[in-house]
Image (cartoon, rainbow, N blue to C red):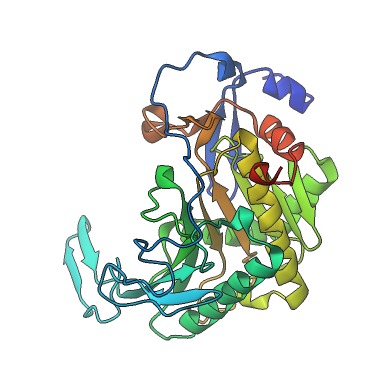
Amino acid sequence: MATLPTLADLNAHPHVRFNPLRGEWIQVSPHRTARPWQGQVERTAGDEPPRYDPTCYLCPGNERAGGNRNPAYTSTFVFDNDFPALLPATPAFESRDGDLLIGRAEPGICRVVCFSPRHDLTIARMSVAELRPVVDVWVDEARALGARPEIAYVQIFENRGAAMGASNPHPHGQIWATASVPNEPLREQRALESYAGAHQGACLLCDYLALERSRAERIVIEEGSFVALVPFWGVWPFETLVIPRRHVADLESLSSGERDDLARLLTRLTTRYDNLFETPFPYSMGFHQRPSDGAAHDEWHLHLHFFPPLLRSATVRKFMVGFEMLGTPQRDLTPEDAASRLRTLSEVHYRDR
């Protein structure tokens, strides 16, 4: 088999790329970017929402869907989810019928984090001073929930936009603290352990970030101690990976300066996302960090995934269907093209011009 000497040669042909964090391949088909689209068209965003919505169950002072009333909060606000997927009082049990029918109890805690009292804001529209307390809340909640003996993992995430299933436009995220390590971070943990074992204890993401910074082909933003890039193996069209330059295993290990940098980077990155198609850009984003199961987990390197679905415009999104569900994840736009487009965008929000 002939060796392709350059990335340009690679991108001239259909090819596969390996994702070492998940131990799987993705299909890249650059020639398909010109194909016509007659499929589903998403709704575009309407008028800007009001600063306060009396019908919103997350706005300050309003009654929530479960009957509780929010305080008149002025910054961030955290509460236990009124309709949680996990319950802390779930009794312990295990059900097994041979090696094929296996189940067990999964207790846990689900919380909601309101980023701001203002209904009309998003991370992209918040100032760094407004976003910094959100970072502190993520750190504090991860520390407090992770310290509980029944909790093995704390998953912090945000679903933004109706396209990603967000049930309310008020700026908010979620925290699920689980009794076992969920599938995705567990899969990454095994990859990180395997890489360290094969490379004299080296960190997969430390080595990967050094390589990406030396090549500069997929870097989108560098903000002090953090870097945002489109991963070489990214599946979603404008997927990004946010990595701290220092080897830190979890959120609570971040210094005050690193928290500042993270807040600034998140504001810059999400502004670029919104500016790409001049629309409130939908995404699912979340942190992956070491488990809170009591082990040291020195192999872990904190990182943040952004998975946005939009592909060609504010109304055309990518779907994971067919071959992608049954065979291998596939993308048309190359990660290098996606990074180039994001990199050239303004950091002045389109609604502020």
Q: Position of residue 168 (x, y in %)?
A: 39, 56
Q: Is residue 121 visible to the viewer in this orientation of the structure?
A: yes
Q: Is residue 178 left or right of residue 192?
A: left
Q: Nearer the viewer, residue 315 or 69?
A: 69
Q: Residue furthest left?
A: 97
Q: Quadrant of residue 235?
A: top right
Residue drawn at x 41%, y 78% is 151
Query: Is residue 237 placed above or below 63 in the rendered structure?
Result: above
Residue drawn at x 46%, y 78% is 72
Q: Position of residue 301 (x, y in %)?
A: 65, 64
Q: Position of residue 309 (x, y in %)?
A: 49, 38
Q: Is residue 125 left or right of residue 318?
A: right
- So how many labels did they put on this image? 0
Query: Is residue 336 placed above or below 73 in the rendered structure?
Result: above
Which quadrant of the figure contains the N terminus? top right
Which quadrant of the figure contains the C terminus? top right
Q: Is residue 55 left or right of residue 297?
A: left
Residue drawn at x 54%, y 44% is 280
Q: Position of residue 175 (x, y in %)?
A: 44, 68
Residue drawn at x 66%, y 57% is 266
